[in-house]
């Protein structure tokens, strides 16, 4: 069954295993809802543990034997470059699928497809440069060297907010290094990964190199996380689920990379360019309705510029145009599903209850364009203290908490006073202060006078409860390979082991 043309209203998709479209063994399907309308637009085969096992077997077979296992780095390079090109060509369609499933702006999802092919190009350039070292040996009769080998089958569990971008963070280096993949997309956004796997086959990836098992976290996700024949797992999503996956993987001694939540601070000093700050803050918290791991959800602003900055962000946030994510001029779409909206409402209540001042939003919009969808107004709280729930928990909705400070030391302490450590923003014209503060923040990424930038060349990952391991950057190849140490005896003098030399 092709996933492109289905004559019915509700489109149907199967799983993608071993280079083929297949039904789930149970015959079950699950729905994918369009959060802008609340309507079901697709039905997808639902993978269970048996299906996941089949996918892991297909990935194992492709890894151990057949054309993929014999390919050289330069052949993988060429495949990845073709894949990048196909993904770029299909970007508008893939972006449309993703916006339909997660409710993010079509403009943003299609925009991500300008970036996604770059991940494959970047790692294509490394695929033929994966090398070990020669080791200077203590004893002259030995020659020692290392080889970097692929790990094998890599399991990938991703969330719904940026489905294929987050797949690509892991898949591009994993494929460059010669691994095979089993991808469990989020239940809200299963379809783009399916189409992606089909594109991989089209450009020449052998069957079984990329497999996709759509389904629920507790079933398909849990089966992948506890599968003994997976060599490494990568998970992006909530800290709670990350802990479950880490525990399951530990039982099989499967290593993993975890990219989890955040409660990232944006620190604005009194000398900052408030126009740039306003743009950076709005992008950091209201883009994607706050549903990004790097959301800059805690604003620390110097008391001297606090009032002016709050006026500027409230002024612009008030005029944000909400509505249909497919309209070119829409600036804010809905949340991705009902529970996300309810959770945002819960945090608004908490903010009020604990004494913060709500200066904007705090409820669902009433305009017609937003009826039926899971929309929530951009919301800003001032007078927030760092111990309030809205300053501590990852909200994943459009809520900005504003806190203030006087001294550099004080703001460093406050910014670091969080369980998370994914990202941070620093806004100042003082170059010494910028670097001084960047050094002291406990966060995997620090942006100075900018926010929400990503690049395949830049390592990405968290401190503390935001996870471990780094995706992207050239060192990602190390996360996708294991070292073999080889000893060679050069003098042909074997010794009797029971006699001292
Ligand atoms: P989640 O972390 O539960 O789901 C992410 C992925 O994990 C999905 O593919 C899901 O099917 C899978 N999963 C869920 N339970 C699993 C299990 N027991 N075993 C294996 N896989 C499992 O996140 P969810 O439920 O979509 O969102 C809940 C909250 O998590 C959000 O409101 C947000 O606060 C946070 N979140 C953070 C993300 C980030 O990038 N930091 C991304 C998505 C969610
Ligand atoms: Mg969940």
Image: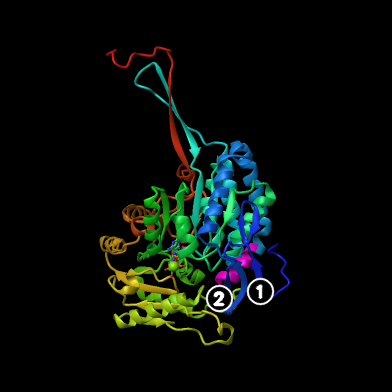
Do the residues under discs 2 and 1 have CB atoms within 8 angstroms? Answer: no
The mark total stands at 2
Q: CA distance from mark 2 to mark 1?
A: 15 Å
**Residue pointed to by mark 2:** 35
First to last magenta residue range: 94-105
Write down the quadrant of residue 164 in the picture.
bottom right
User: In the picture shown, does residue 259 fall above or below 29?
Assistant: above
Q: Is disc 2 placed on a helix, strand or loop?
A: loop
Residue positioned 38% across, 60% down in the render: 244
Q: Position of residue 40 (x, y in %)?
A: 60, 76
Q: Reply yes or no: does residue 378 show up in magenta.
A: no
Which comes before the other along the chain, label 2 or label 1? 1
**Residue pointed to by mark 1:** 10
Residue positioned 46% across, 42% down in the render: 478
User: In the picture shown, does residue 285 fall above or below 495?
Assistant: below
Q: Is disc 1 placed on a helix, strand or loop?
A: loop
């Amino acid at each position: 069954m092709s996933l492109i043309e289905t004559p019915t209203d509700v489109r149907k998709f199967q799983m993608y295993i071993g280079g083929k479209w297949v039904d789930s063994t149970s015959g079950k399907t699950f729905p994918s809802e369009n959060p802008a309308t609340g309507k079901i637009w697709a039905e997808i085969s639902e993978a269970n543990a048996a299906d996941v096992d089949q996918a892991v077997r297909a990935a194992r077979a492709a890894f151990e034997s057949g054309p993929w296992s014999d390919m050289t780095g330069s052949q993988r390079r060429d495949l990845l470059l073709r894949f990048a090109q196909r993904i770029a060509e299909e970007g508008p369609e893939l972006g449309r699928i993703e916006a339909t499933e997660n409710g993010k702006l079509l403009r943003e999802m299609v925009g991500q497809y300008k970036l996604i092919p770059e991940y494959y190009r970047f790692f294509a350039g490394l695929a033929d440069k994966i090398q070990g070292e020669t080791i200077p040996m203590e004893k002259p009769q030995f020659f020692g060297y290392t080889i970097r080998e692929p790990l094998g089958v890599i399991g990938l569990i991703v969330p719904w907010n940026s489905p294929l971008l987050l797949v690509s963070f892991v898949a591009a280096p994993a494929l460059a290094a010669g691994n095979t993949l089993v991808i469990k997309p989020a239940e809200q956004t299963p379809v783009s990964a399916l189409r992606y796997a089909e594109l991989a086959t089209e450009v020449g990836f052998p069957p079984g190199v990329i497999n996709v098992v759509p389904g629920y976290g507790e079933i398909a996700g849990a089966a992948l996380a506890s599968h003994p024949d997976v060599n490494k797992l990568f998970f992006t999503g909530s800290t709670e689920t990350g802990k479950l996956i880490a525990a399951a993987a530990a039982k099989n001694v499967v290593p993993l990379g975890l990219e989890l939540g955040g409660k990232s601070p944006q620190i604005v000093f009194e000398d900052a360019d408030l126009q740039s700050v306003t743009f950076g803050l709005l992008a950091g918290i209201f883009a994607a309705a706050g549903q990004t791991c790097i959301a800059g959800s805690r604003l620390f602003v110097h008391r001297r510029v606090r009032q002016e900055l709050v006026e500027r962000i409230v002024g612009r946030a008030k005029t944000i145009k909400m509505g249909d994510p497919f309209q070119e001029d829409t600036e804010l779409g809905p949340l991705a599903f009902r529970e996300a909206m309810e959770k945002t409402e819960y945090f608004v209540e908490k903010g009020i209850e604990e004494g913060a001042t709500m200066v904007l939003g705090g409820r669902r919009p009433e305009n017609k364009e937003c009826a039926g969808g899971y929309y929530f107004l951009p919301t800003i709280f001032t007078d927030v203290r760092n111990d309030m729930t809205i300053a501590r928990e990852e909200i994943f909705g459009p809520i900005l908490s504003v806190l203030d400070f006087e001294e550099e030391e004080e703001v460093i302490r406050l910014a670091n006073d969080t369980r998370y450590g994914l990202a941070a923003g620093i806004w100042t014209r003082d170059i010494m202060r910028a670097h001084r503060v960047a050094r002291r923040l406990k966060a995997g990424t620090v942006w100075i006078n900018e926010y929400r930038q990503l690049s395949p060349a830049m390592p990405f990952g968290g401190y503390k409860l935001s996870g471990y391991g780094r995706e992207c950057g050239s060192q990602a190849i190390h996360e996708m390979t294991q070292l073999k140490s080889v000893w060679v005896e050069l003098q042909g003098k074997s010794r009797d082991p029971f006699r001292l030399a």
